[in-house]
Image: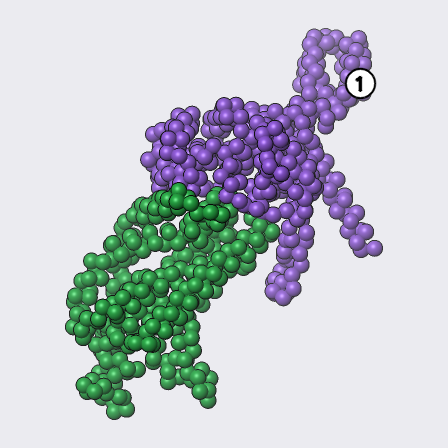
Amino acid sequence: MTYNRSMPVIEIENLSKSYRIYQKQEGLLAAVRGLFSREYRDVEAVRSVNLTVEQGEFVAFLGPNGAGKTTTLKLLSGVITPTSGTARVMGHIPWKRENSYRRRFALVMGQKNQLWWDLPAQESFRLHQEIYRIAPEQFDHTRDELVDLLGVGKLLRQPVRELSLGERMKMELIAALLHSPEVLFLDEPTIGLDVIAQHNIQTFLRHYQQLRKITILLTSHYMKDVAALCRRVVIIAQGQIMYDGSLSGIVDKFSGHKVVTLQLAEDHVPVDWSRYGELLDVQSPKVRLKINRQTVPEVLAHILANNAIEDVSVEDPPLEEVISQVFTEAGAQADAKDAARQVAATK
Amino acid sequence: MATVSTPSTTPSELSARLRTWWIILRICIEERLVYRGDFALGTLMRFLPIVTQIFLWTAVYSSVQTSTETAADPAGQQTVAGFTRDEIIAYFLLTMVARAFSSMPGLAGGIARSIRDGSIKKYITQPVDMLGFLLLSRIAHKLVYYTVATLPFALVFYLCRGYFQELPSAEIWVAFIASLFMGFALGYYLESLLGMIGFWFLEVSSLLFVYMLFSFFLSGHMFPIGMLDGFAIFPGSSWSWGDLVRILPFQYLAYFPAAIFVGKIQGDELVRGLAIELCWVLMFMALSRIAYHRGLRRYSAFGG
């Protein structure tokens, strides 16, 4: 099957990856025992994931640590082979590691340095020109464009080890984009950066993606990255996809309530607010209540009819709170499943 | 080498590869030149042991002269394992040259580290072959080293010219140089193979230490391997340590080139020796290639 541009760029079907992890018991005796026989535990890092990404999409992977986000990126960039299932990126099976595939994508890991530490970044760029077989005119043009966009012209001749973390990340991005990859995998590109550097990288990524219409998969812990960049969000927890849709849709799907803030009039008589909903806090004259989404109109009407209220606002709960709740619930579900499996196994 | 198998090697493909190799070489040379001071000092310090060697062997031979059991060569000079004192000092000077080709400081440890810390991913996701890349970077290291070390080497050899009888014939020169280059290749593939054990065992530093120790004794770096002939492998065995060492590949890292130059290996024996060395090089080349593929398979199955 040959790939053409009308087909999805990334197609993942029932992709699973499990690792065997050595279980170390506590204590010296156990350590000695471990020399002879070892216990292993299977960890399912990715469980039957199905995902399709179209050309030009900017997709964010959200999930707690160990959810399987990085594992998925490693699978798609061919670093690891799956236990079962298939994936195609631009028609290539990533873990075959064909040069024809490797010249068309790039992987940037925020915590790994791919540049030559002791040399100026421009030397690493030259090396990339050769290993990716970039024509000289195209190389000059792309490099100048990227350097310009990121504003790092003055730093090209400085050894990489003397750059700040943010500057280094910019150089990493340039190195990764020199060969104009059609697909870009970004694993925590803004990790450890200050707010300004984060913002610069976001602005660059958004601009570059709109300009080149490339497909980008991003993992990040910073909700701001995601909110700024991605229309589509995939939530992964315990190796499974919990949600695939827009950022705002997360709240609609996972949060069953709204936060209502009431500003009371000065002559207000004290009331037991907890009969209307969960009382979040009282900071006179303000009261915040968590109210079931379906009953908001009805409850609000009742409150307004019976109390002296000066102002009302109805809001969705903060996104981060909803997402962390989704993660916690997914974790609890998985733990319950594991426990059930263990019980079944011991019977 | 720098790019993994591509189905056809057209002229433009070949020139692209050559250019890639050249750039890798150039960048590696630049990188080596960053730490000039450390490098120059390290290079010069390597010449110190030769002074102790000269004193040591002069003492050994003068004590041997007073005892009666040792053999004398036709000219009446004392020999130990077939070497006169002058020959043995010449021999040690030459093993220094051989080691300058075959030693690979940090290669195996570096590969093992890149496996452990995950920086080996670079070679998996980018269209570049690790073994080819590291080979070029080693060539760069060596080129820089020779440039800096040629002058001190020349000076030491000039000062020690009295220990050399006469310059060898052209054929011996050719064989000597061939054995040096093959020694480089053998050292490279042997050490990279060791480093790739890191795919299977996370910590390989003790293993590397054992290897260093063995290669020090068995390569002839410490003494000519003929001196091991008198020692049986185990009591009563007709096999000596010398016999064992002659079938191992380590001797090509130091003993073999030096022994060629001082004329201890000649004629058929020389041709056979070079042929066997070539076989070792090809074998370790193949083994490290296999280990790399197997290792990557394991790496990508287990973690990454």
The reply, left or right, for residue A204 in relation to residue A148 is right
Q: Whole-percent x and y of residue B23? A: 35, 44
Q: Amino acid at mark 1?
A: Thr
Seen in the picture, residue B93 relative to A236 is either above or below; the reply is: below
Pick out the residue farthest to the bottom: B68
Q: Is residue B93 visible?
A: no
10 Å neighbourhood of mark 1: few (<14), some, or many (≥20)?
few
The reply, left or right, for residue B241 in relation to residue A280 is left
Q: Nearer the viewer, residue B277 or B219?
A: B277
Residue at the (26%, 80%) spot, across then down = B83
Query: How did the renderer colour the structure?
Result: by chain
What residue sits right under mark 1 in the picture? A295
Q: Whole-percent x and y of residue A65? A: 61, 40
* Element marked by disc 1: helix
Chain represented in green: B
Pick out the residue farthest to the right: A347
Q: Whole-percent x and y of residue B29? A: 32, 48
Specify the quadrant of the image occupied by residue B244. Answer: bottom left
Q: Nearer the viewer, residue A64 or A73?
A: A73
**Image hue for chain A:** purple
Specify the quadrant of the image occupied by residue A121. Answer: top left
Q: Is residue B237 visible?
A: yes
Seen in the picture, residue B268 relative to B50 is either above or below; the reply is: below
Q: Quadrant of the N terminus of chain A?
A: top right
The reply, left or right, for residue B240 in relation to residue A105 is left
Q: Whole-percent x and y of residue A323? A: 66, 30
Residue at the (25%, 63%) spot, across then down = B47
